[in-house]
Image (cartoon, rainbow, N blue to C red):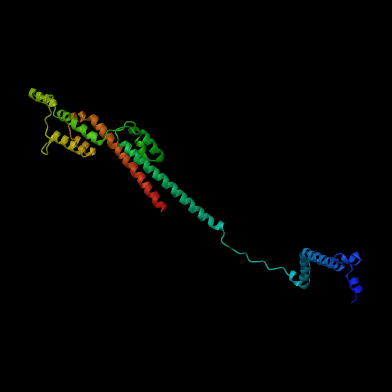
Amino acid sequence: MNPADETAELAPSRDPGAYGRRPVLNGVFWLMIAFCALCLLAAVSVWMLGPRLAPVRQAAHVSAATPALTAAPLPAAAPLTLPTQAAASPDLDTRVQRLETDESRLAAAAAAALAAADLSDAAARPTPFAIELAAAQRLLPASPDAAALAPLAQEGAPTRAALATELSNLAGQAAAAAHEPGRNASFVDRMLWTFSRVVTLRRVDANAGGADAALAGAEQAADDGDLEGALTRLDRLPESARSALGSWREKAERRIEIDRRIAGIRAEATAELAAARGAQS
């Protein structure tokens, strides 16, 4: 190689295009881009229009292939009988109503029993109990015992213990009245009777007889709380002695009547509560 050739090879080219960047996006590239766009557009068209065209074609094919199936009507299906809620609802409603009725009855019976207990406590005291009786009558409107207590509740009655003490205090006067001499008695007999009214002399042992025995038995019965027995023994006294105990007898009879009516109300309320509990169980 001569020096001239080396100089010509090393000399820079005079064409500016020889130093520029070669083109990348040539015609082949854009052709491929256009083909891909057409494929994507075709896929979108098939995806959107395919479900609309397929059922029509399938229906036409089926109707053309099986024309005999639509000609004959289908046989009527036999009615299917199933247990419905309407058939069972009357029995269910009856049971629910019965349960509600039993619960209401039990609640009313329990309230009446409480009112009867409150009335019993109030009537046992020596004070009026009209308020407690009115409360019980609202819960026991058909009770004849509650209606009979209305006049007695306005005043009340002393307790049995108080009546026993009062009878012991009045027994001397009753004994003196029982031994009052008649109109034809002697002066001595009248003097002794007058003295007995100041200092009472009577027998209270088991050997007593007549008016003394009746008074002693009545006092013992009253101390035991048996006012009924005390009144029975006092009925043996002479009229004069019974008159001396008239006020006590009236109070004792009122106490006996109150207690009897209260016992009837409590028995009625207890029986109704037991019946309500039995109906619910």
On screen, residue 273 versus residue 35, left or right, reads left
Q: Which quadrant of the view contains residue 254?
A: top left
Q: Position of residue 145 (x, y in %)?
A: 35, 39
Q: Is residue 269 visible?
A: yes
Please identify the residue farthest to the left as the structure is shown: 188
Please, is residue 238 above or below residue 279 in the view? above
Please, is residue 55 above or below residue 250 in the view? below
Q: Residue at 17%, 30% (x, y): give it.
A: 174
Q: Residue at 48%, 50% (x, y): give it.
A: 97
On screen, residue 243 versus residue 259, left or right, reads left
Please identify the residue farthest to the bottom as the structure is shown: 1
Q: Position of residue 127 (x, y in %)?
A: 31, 32
Q: Residue at 36%, 47% (x, y): give it.
A: 271
On-image quarter of the N terminus:
bottom right
Q: Is residue 235 visible?
A: no
Q: Position of residue 189 (x, y in %)?
A: 9, 25
Q: Which quadrant of the view contains residue 69?
A: bottom right
Q: Which quadrant of the view contains residue 80?
A: bottom right
On-image quarter of the C terminus:
bottom left
